[in-house]
Amino acid sequence: MDGDNSTESPLFSVVVIAHNVESYIERCMRSVLNQHSEDFELIVVDDASTDQTLQRISAIADGDPRVSVVKKNQNEGAHLARRTGVAHTVGKFVYFLDGDDELCPHFFGLSSGLVTSVAADVYRLGCRVVLEPEGEEEHRAIVEHSLNDSRGRALGEDILLRSFSDKFAHADTWRLVSCLYRGEVCRSAFRMMTEDRLGYMEDAYEFFVVASCSAVLENATDLVAQRYNLGSGRSGYSHMSYDEFVKRQSEVFDLVRSVYSFAEDDGRDVTRRCARWFEGACLRTISNEWTVRLASETQILSVSNLVDTWGHVATLGMLTPPLIGRAQWVLEDDSRLDDALLASWCSAYAPLLDSPDIEVEGGEGAVFLLGLLRQIDDHRTARDREVRERLELEMARESVFPRRVLNALLPRGSKMRRVLSAVARELRS
């Protein structure tokens, strides 16, 4: 039961999902409970934490009628935790919060004014990004800008297209927890979602479905709703192990399949087109992580996993851009012609070109890359020829010098020169 038409329904439902966030969960819950409003409910879903998270949730919730705690006996991941939490809400509007983040003060007061003055199904709100633990300020600024760089109103199909296509020059973020949702739309959308566990980037799938179900999206990023503690969760650009990468690329594959499944059930051309675009975006994400976050030896090992998961064509598409970038870098300076990393990447890339699927589906990027590699071979050939010619010239010079000395000491026709020549002929015979 949605409960949106009930006079007893709170204006806001805040859904907090928590798994092993004992260091953050009290701060998160207090940021909701200390708001200057009573017109809300707080649903906290503990996703089978193994630390003290549940105990701390229970201690804060004890005796507070505004808080409902949902205890899961088995860890099922963020998507299913949110799905469970949404099913328990009755508020007119739903807002999601991860257990390691916080609401900004006066959230309810400011949001109340927004929803009463502007009618929409989705309100994209602002976010203040904080480094935790210490990190790079440049990274923090980039993330904060991307999360707050949305503007204007989107209607109908454009809600989906602004986040999942190249139709608009200015793209909107697809981050689910940056938005406030009309309760009935949110609950209906989550009922349509998969009951399977999802992993990395699961909120992109969730926003895809909600956006497909919404008629009006209002960008109101000047209303800063949340403190996003960057680095306390899975975000970042640190080194990634082989096992972590293999798991992540498999999770992204499952995510893409879930988006495609929803698009087929939805049946509209726009959702199918956006699903195809989303797959391309995910392939670029995996390509970037393969390039930046893996050690070179791990990169080579992981190629077979990518092929097993995505197939030859998609893997070729993932690896071609970084190889093009590396090859162009090598061509900028002949001192880089023997670059070991490019050679290593090429050794893993070459077998992908032997797949018959490549001939069928083509690959302009692969053709361009092969052209760059031929240029590198030509530069190497020219360099090696110059080195060889220089060595031959030096050897010739070295052989001429002793003859000049001999001619100076023993001129041609001299008695000693004739004697030495006779001795040399005798020795050769």
Image (spheres, helix red, strand yellow):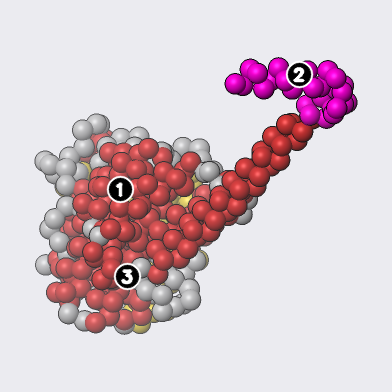
Whether pointer 3 and pointer 1 mark residues with C-beta atoms closer than 8 Å, the reply is: no
Please identify the quarter of the rendering in which residue 56 is found: top left
In the rendered image, residue 411 lying in the magenta stretch gets the answer: yes
For discs 3 and 1, the disc positioned in front in the rendered view = 3
160 lies above or below 304:
below
Q: Position of residue 244 (x, y in %)?
A: 30, 41
Q: Amino acid at mark 1?
A: Val
Q: Which residue is mark 2?
A: 420
Q: Secondary structure at mark 1?
A: helix
- Image quadrant occupied by the N terminus: bottom left
> Badge 1: how crowded within 10 Å, few (<14), some, or many (20+)?
many
424 lies above or below 171:
above
For discs 2 and 1, the disc positioned in front in the rendered view = 2
Q: Is residue 295 left or right of residue 269?
A: right
Q: Position of residue 53 (x, y in %)?
A: 26, 36
Q: Which residue is mark 1?
A: 303
C-alpha span from label 3 to label 1: 20 Å
Magenta span of residues = 402-429
Compare residues 302 and 250 and report the one nearer the observer. 302
Q: Who comes first in sequence, dot 2 or dot 3?
A: 3
- Image quadrant occupied by the C terminus: top right
> Badge 2: how crowded within 10 Å, few (<14), some, or many (20+)?
few
Residue displayed at 47% across by 63% down: 371
Q: Amino acid at mark 3?
A: Gly
